[in-house]
Image: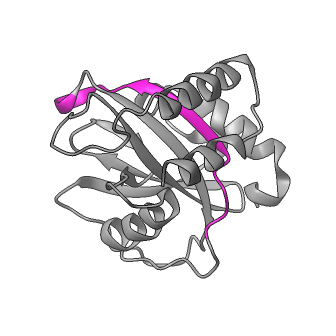
Amino acid sequence: MRKQIRDEVISITPIDAIERDDISRCLAWIDSGTDLCRVAKPATPPMHLVSYVVVVDNGHVLLVDHRNAQLWLPPGGHVEPGEHPRVTVDRELEEELGFVASHPIEPPLFVTITTTVGLTAGHTDVSLWYVVRASRHHSFKFDEAEFRDARWFPFDEVPIERTDPHMKRFLTKLENNKLLAS
């Protein structure tokens, strides 16, 4: 599985020097042979792989008000040992939103390395950002145990001060990729 995860990271074209550095650091981490997946909550190992599921529709993004992180984030979750990150996307879509993607999950658009905040602060998430298209008219059934709310935001109205610190860069990259942003 390590090779498949590495291939996901290699498939990403960086938008800027920050992402280029994150890709380089991520590849070195993968190649180090260390555990990539969380094996015990909240943070063992302290650096582990996450799949974000960025649900978009015509210039809007679906974000969830995450109870633990205390931020508006894309749905997603930890990649399980032996699980491909795209399988994580499918699993998390169903678990967190009651939704099944109508198209195969495409390679990730973005990668970030971030120290977490909120109730489980202090560990490092290596996040692969996958884009999934869905209609804003679909009735999502979000996991109320994990999220306070789920809401569509126009790209220019995302609460940047209360979201992932890389969201603005991600949205710029997404908007530059017109096929994915629509």
The residue at 40%/73% (across/down) is 140
The residue at 59%/24% (across/down) is 22
Q: Is residue 173 above or below residue 116?
A: below
Residue 23 pos. (x, y %): 63, 29
Would residue 6 be visible to someone looking at this image? yes
Q: Is residue 50 above or below residue 27?
A: below
Classify residue 28 as left or right of residue 38. Answer: right
Residue 104 pos. (x, y %): 63, 75
Classify residue 116 as left or right of residue 16. Answer: left
Residue 88 pos. (x, y %): 42, 62
Q: Quadrant of residue 172?
A: top right
Classify residue 163 as left or right of residue 6. Answer: left
Viewer-closest of 7 and 41: 7
Would residue 73 be visible to someone looking at this image? no
Q: Quadrant of residue 76?
A: bottom left
* Residue 110 forms part of the magenta stretch: yes
* Residue 67 forms part of the magenta stretch: no
Point out the stretch of residues depicted in magenta: 105-120
